[in-house]
Amino acid sequence: MQNKSINILKNPSIFRGVFCFCLFVLCQISLAQPQLKFKDPKKNFGFVKKGEVVTIEFDFTNSGNQPAIISEAKAECSCTTVDFPKQPIAPGQSAKIIVIFDTKSVYDRQDRIVEVLSNAKHPSQKIRFKGVVLK
């Protein structure tokens, strides 16, 4: 019995075929990603009186081709809380991130950022809100 194993390094046509197949698979994997697209990542809540609680909704859509999972949403200060979807967001599906800003400990101009962490193409995205808290 003769051992007729094929050495792909010695056969250029087989090597090219395997290389092209691997390159194709890697491209498909790298293109298969969720993507969070915010309708309006910057909001202005206007003028409010000190002590009011402001609720701001940020609408977004997963414009990618894989489910998006938000792992965390971090606010800059303790006066802000964030509620975000805990379940995966399917491709093409829309959802909301709700930011609650308690003005009892702040006044004057406010400009805050919330960092949204996910498995999306851009894993760290920032949404922003601002306004004026009157005494």
Image (cartoon, rainbow, N blue to C red):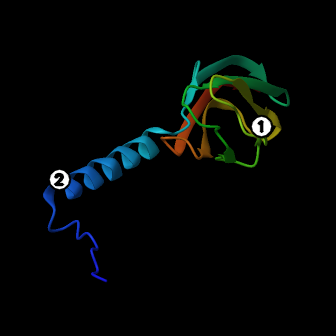
- Rendered location of residue 55, percent (x, y): 79, 25
- Tell me the kind of residue under disc 1: Pro
Would you say 100 lies left or right of 62 here?
right
Real-space Cα separation, disc 1 to disc 2, in angstroms: 50 Å
Residue at 73 percent of width and 39 percent of height: 88
**Which structural element holds mark 2?**
helix
Note whether 61 is above or below 20 in the view shown.
above
Given the current orientation, which residue lies at the most extreme bottom position? 1
Q: Which residue is mark 1?
A: 85
Depth check: 10 or 62 in front? 10
- Tell me the kind of residue under disc 2: Ser
Residue at 67 percent of width and 43 percent of height: 69
Would you say 86 lies left or right of 9 here?
right
Quadrant where the image shows the C terminus? top right
In the rendered image, which quarter is residue 15 located in?
bottom left
- Rendered location of residue 129, percent (x, y): 62, 28
Q: Residues within 10 Å of mark 1 (few under 14, many from 20)?
A: some
Residue at 27 percent of width and 81 percent of height: 2
Q: Please tell me whether mark 1 or mark 2 is closer to you in this view.
A: 2
